[in-house]
Amino acid sequence: MEQLKCKTVNCRHNLKCHCNAGVIGMDEKGRCMTKMKRPGGALEQTFAELEAADDMLSDAPAIVQCDADCIYNRERKCTATSILVKDKLFKTACMTRIKQ
């Protein structure tokens, strides 16, 4: 995985659009199952991003486990070179997913 850009709000793994979770899990509908709400909500995320130095941001996780029906899914692992994850109305989802 070369790049994972995360545009979620109120996730403790997200820092300046970088996901610092070691493994990302996507369900059969392409929803991010790794998202964990911050105890202080979106306001806490804003403060964390203001305090974070750019050199402390992690690269994309090595493994994205995926159960979705997608052209990038190979044996439950994502093979896309880049992934965009962002909030939708009621879920956080992979926007890179292309159904087979």
Image (cartoon, rainbow, N blue to C red):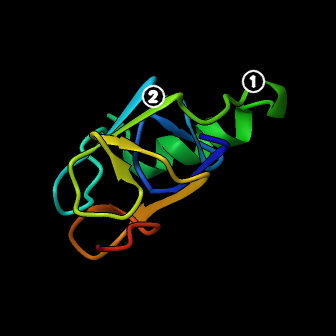
Where is residue 62? Give x, y as percent.
53, 28
Q: Secondary structure at mark 1?
A: helix
Residue 44 is tagged as none
Using the image as rendered, state which of residue 83 and residue 74 is in the foreground.
Answer: 74
Where is residue 68? Give x, y as percent.
23, 57
Q: Earlier in the sequence, mark 1 or mark 2?
A: 2
Q: Name the residue rendered at 80%, 30% in the picture.
A: 53
Q: Quadrant of residue 38?
A: top left
Residue hosting label 2: 21
Q: How many residues crowd mark 2 within 10 Å: few (<14), some (14–19), many (20+)?
A: some
In the rendered image, the vertical position of residue 3 relative to residue 65, given as above or below: below
Q: Secondary structure at mark 2?
A: loop
Look at the image and tell me in which quarter the N terminus lies: top right
Residue 92 horizontal side relative to residue 13, left or right? left
Residue 56 is tagged as 1
Q: Quadrant of residue 55?
A: top right
Q: Is residue 96 visible?
A: yes
Between the residue at mark 1 and the residue at mark 2, the CA separation in whole angstroms equals 14 Å
Q: Name the residue rendered at 29%, 73% in the picture.
A: 100
Q: Which amino acid type is shown beneath numbered disc 1?
A: Met
